[in-house]
């Protein structure tokens, strides 16, 4: 936590024996900039590899977020979705869509850039927590490379930036082992980071509450000047601004301050009418998901501890220490670890009450996973640096075994898999090229994969899903199941084109498709059959999406 400022000779970031403070700051800034550049370049390489291996999306939510941001770009409003989804990611992507073209490619480029920015935030956080350049570098490199961090670094969802902002906020209140205490102004930066994070995802809300309490406690400590107390008190208030604003908005817009919780609970109940898993399983769902999805991060500390124990047990009493003491080096992670544990406890309680994410629960634990990766990278680097040659060989072998076990067992542990929706994206792009931008399309809804088609099409205002498959709505038969229903539905929305699976009912009504991609095809509707008209620049506006996940 924050402490009274140390003597001038121990100014933050100053190099010992550097002479003037200015020269010391310059001497420390150059290595920091090099390390930061290395972390960002490494993250870029990891992201490029993930894309080269074919990863595109975690779930259909990725595409839903793109569609809703495209809609916001066409018609901006304070609450972009009118649902339980928080607004900040849509504000950012929608604003960029107003500057650039509102396409899936632009959304993915933004996600790539946000992944790099997240890696930079994680590295800064590591420097603040450890106070050690090499330890922070090793931890940040690992934090940018473990599988979920790698995938979320290119996905069009806000989990990684949100977790990085949360880590940045917590780290702003941590005093590294060698000091000095962080300046009070740093807490304001952390609070501002939490405003963005809490308006992006719900997981940082418990973090914001703990941050505010920590900042107020720090302000009450003896030895704080009035200016520092004012900054810390302001940071506590700012940290809670995001949740307070969203609760107030829900009260004004929906008549219920906790409307978003009721909406999430109703969706979960509709998806799992019987209540799903029991209470005990729900309480441990998040820790179990962490271990199941990132086993290497949990096995590595065990390997470190075993090698350290064996090295010290086999050493002669008078011999030099064969393995460096790591427990003291792990102490800076105690406070951030406690915050992450409280966050997971809050998420577990929310899950019991049906107020948590409905799939891929490990996404919500990314703050804890990033923190664990920082600790593993840090402690491993210290161990290699200070161990004897024999201990280094044993440690290297143990970490290779951990990596092998993780690679071998990971496919068997994962419960949910990724779906890139390649065919749906391809037919959406084909429709964007072959149809006039203002032409209305009727889109077959088989499952939530139609959101990938809408995102690739890039103009959700002119695309009409043929039915709702929201589990809270009464089930409706697809109009693409028979020619008569399809003709009526196409006439109702004034569709000039049909976009769906290549099946006899559609062919019987509309004839051969204009284009096919995988199992999907594009047709001119019967009333408007013929060669598609060329698109003009004036037609290239996109519109709002009515579909919500």
Image (spheres, grey):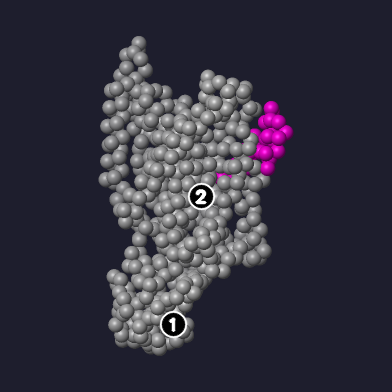
Q: In this view, does 358 lie above or below 227?
A: below
Q: Earlier in the sequence, mark 1 or mark 2?
A: 2
Assign a secondary structure to mark 1. loop
Instruction: Name the front one of labels 1 and 2.
Output: 1
Residues packed near mark 2 inside 10 Å, few (<14), some (14 to 19) or many (20 plus): many
The residue carrying mark 2 is 162
Q: Which residue is painted at 67% across and 45% down in the image?
A: 237
Counting labels gives: 2
Q: Nearer the viewer, residue 364 or 428?
A: 428
Q: Position of residue 406 (x, y in %)?
A: 31, 43
233 magenta-colored? yes
Q: Is residue 157 above or below residue 529?
A: above
**Quadrant of the image containing the N terminus:** top right
Q: x and y percent of residue 375 in the render? A: 43, 35
- Residue 495, labelled with which disc? 1
Going by the image, does 529 lie left or right of 401? right
Tell me the CA gap for discs 1 and 2: 40 Å
Residue 240 lies, in percent from the top left, at 63, 48
Residue at (42, 30) in percent of width and height = 134
* Image coordinates for residue 322, horizontal then vertical, percent: 34, 20
Residue stretch rendered in magenta on the structure = 207-234
């Amino acid at each position: 936590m924050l402490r009274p400022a140390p003597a001038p000779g121990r100014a933050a970031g100053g190099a010992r024996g550097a002479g003037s403070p200015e020269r010391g700051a310059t001497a420390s800034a150059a290595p920091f900039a090099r390390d930061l550049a290395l972390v960002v370049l490494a993250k870029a390489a990891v992201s490029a590899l993930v894309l080269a291996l074919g990863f595109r999306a975690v779930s259909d939510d990725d595409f839903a977020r793109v569609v809703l941001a495209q809609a916001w770009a066409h018609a901006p409003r304070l609450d972009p979705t009118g649902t339980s989804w928080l607004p900040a990611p849509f504000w950012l992507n929608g604003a960029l869509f107003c500057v650039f073209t509102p396409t899936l490619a632009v959304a993915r480029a933004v996600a790539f850039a946000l992944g790099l920015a997240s890696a930079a935030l994680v590295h800064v956080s590591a420097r603040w927590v450890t106070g050690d350049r090499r330890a922070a570098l090793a931890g940040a490199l690992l934090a940018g490379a473990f599988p979920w961090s790698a995938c979320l670094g290119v996905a069009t969802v806000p989990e990684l930036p949100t977790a990085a902002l949360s880590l940045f906020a917590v780290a702003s209140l941590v005093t590294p082992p060698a000091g000095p205490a962080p300046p009070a102004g740093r807490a304001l930066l952390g609070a501002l980071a939490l405003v963005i994070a809490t308006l992006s995802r719900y997981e940082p809300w418990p973090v914001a509450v703990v941050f505010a309490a920590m900042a107020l406690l720090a302000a009450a400590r003896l030895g704080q000047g009035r200016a520092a107390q004012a900054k810390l008190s302001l940071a506590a208030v700012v940290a809670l601004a995001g949740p307070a604003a969203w609760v107030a908005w829900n009260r004004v817009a929906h008549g219920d301050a906790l409307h978003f919780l009721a909406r999430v609970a109703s969706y979960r109940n509709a998806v799992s009418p019987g209540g799903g898993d029991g209470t005990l399983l729900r309480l441990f769902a998040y820790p179990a998901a962490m271990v199941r999805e990132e086993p290497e991060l949990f096995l590595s500390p065990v390997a470190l501890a075993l090698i350290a124990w064996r090295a010290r047990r086999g050493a002669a009493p008078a011999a030099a220490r064969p393995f460096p003491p790591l427990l003291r080096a792990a102490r800076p992670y105690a406070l951030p670890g406690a915050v992450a544990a409280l966050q997971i406890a809050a998420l577990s309680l929310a899950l019991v009450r049906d107020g948590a994410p409905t799939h891929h629960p490990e996404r919500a634990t990314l703050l804890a996973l990033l923190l664990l990766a920082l600790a593993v990278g840090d402690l491993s680097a210290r161990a290699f640096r200070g161990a004897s040659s024999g201990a280094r060989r044993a440690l290297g072998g143990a970490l290779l075994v951990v990596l092998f076990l993780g690679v071998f067992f990971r496919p068997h542990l994962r419960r949910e898999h990724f779906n890139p929706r390649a065919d749906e994206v391809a037919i959406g792009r084909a429709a964007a090229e072959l149809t006039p931008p203002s032409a209305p399309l009727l889109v077959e809804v088989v499952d939530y994969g139609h959101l990938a088609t809408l995102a690739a099409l890039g103009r959700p205002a002119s695309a009409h899903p043929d039915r709702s498959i929201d589990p809270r709505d009464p089930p409706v038969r697809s109009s693409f199941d028979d020619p008569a229903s399809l003709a009526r539905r196409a006439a109702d929305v004034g569709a000039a084109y049909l976009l769906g699976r290549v099946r006899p009912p559609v062919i019987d009504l509309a004839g051969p498709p204009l284009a096919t991609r995988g199992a999907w095809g594009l047709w001119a509707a019967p009333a408007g059959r013929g060669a598609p008209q060329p698109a003009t620049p004036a037609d290239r506006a996109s519109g709002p999406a009515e579909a919500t996940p």
